[in-house]
Amino acid sequence: MHAGYYAGSLPLRHWIRARLSAQRRMPIIVLFYHRIADDGAKIGTHSNRLFCNQIRWLQRHCDLISLEEAQRRLRNGFNDRLAACITFDDGYSENCDQAYSIFNRPADSLHLLRKLVARTYRSQICSRRGGGLFRPS
C-alpha cells in the first residue's frame, strides 16, 4: 500500500515542490529529537545508527540551517529550497555523549552540524562540559 501511494502521489509531489520552489516558499522543517542512545530504550529514543542515517538523508535533501536562519527566512518570506533545523528537546547526557559526538566526527561532514544545533541544547552541552553557563556569541 505504501509503495502504491508513493508512486501514485509522486507526480503531484514533484509539481507542488516545483511550484513552491518557484515561489520561494519551500517548507522549513524543525525536527526535535528526544534522546539518542543505543541502550535499547524504545519510547522517544533513536539509535545512533538511525540518527546518523537520518542526518545524512537530511544533508542530501535539505539545507540544514540554524533556528536563527529559519526565523530569518520566515521573516523575509524567502526559502527556495527545503530546509531543516535539528533540535533536542531535553538535555539527556546521552545526547551530549553520543549524538553530539556524531556531529564532531572529523572524517564526516556531520561535524559541521554542531553549529546548527539549537542554542538551548548547546547551552546544556556547555554547562555539562565546562561547568558554566552558555554565553551566546
Image: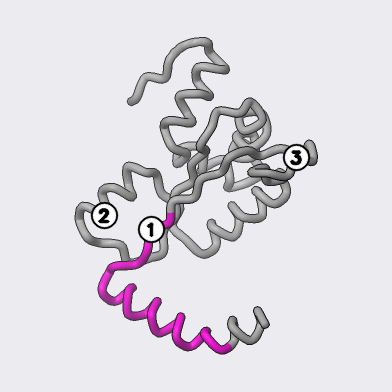
* Front position in the image: 19 or 101: 19
Left or right: residue 89 compared with residue 6: left
Left or right: residue 78 compared with residue 51: left
Residue at label 3? 41
Check disc 1: other Cα within 10 Å, few if <14, some if 14-19, many if 20+. many
Magenta residues, dominant SS class: helix
Quadrant for the N terminus in the image: bottom right
**Which label's residue is closer to the chain start, 1 or 2?**
1
Q: Position of residue 38 (x, y in %)?
A: 76, 39
Q: Position of residue 86 (x, y in %)?
A: 49, 46
Residue at label 1? 28
Q: Residue, x 43% and y 30% (percent of image)?
A: 120
Residue that extends furthest to the front in the rendered view of this protein: 43
Amino acid type of the residue that numbered disc 3 sits on in the rendered structure:
Ala
Q: Position of residue 100 (x, y in %)?
A: 60, 34
Q: Position of residue 70 (x, y in %)?
A: 33, 50
Q: Which residues are magenta?
A: 8-29
**Which label's residue is closer to the chain start, 1 or 3?**
1
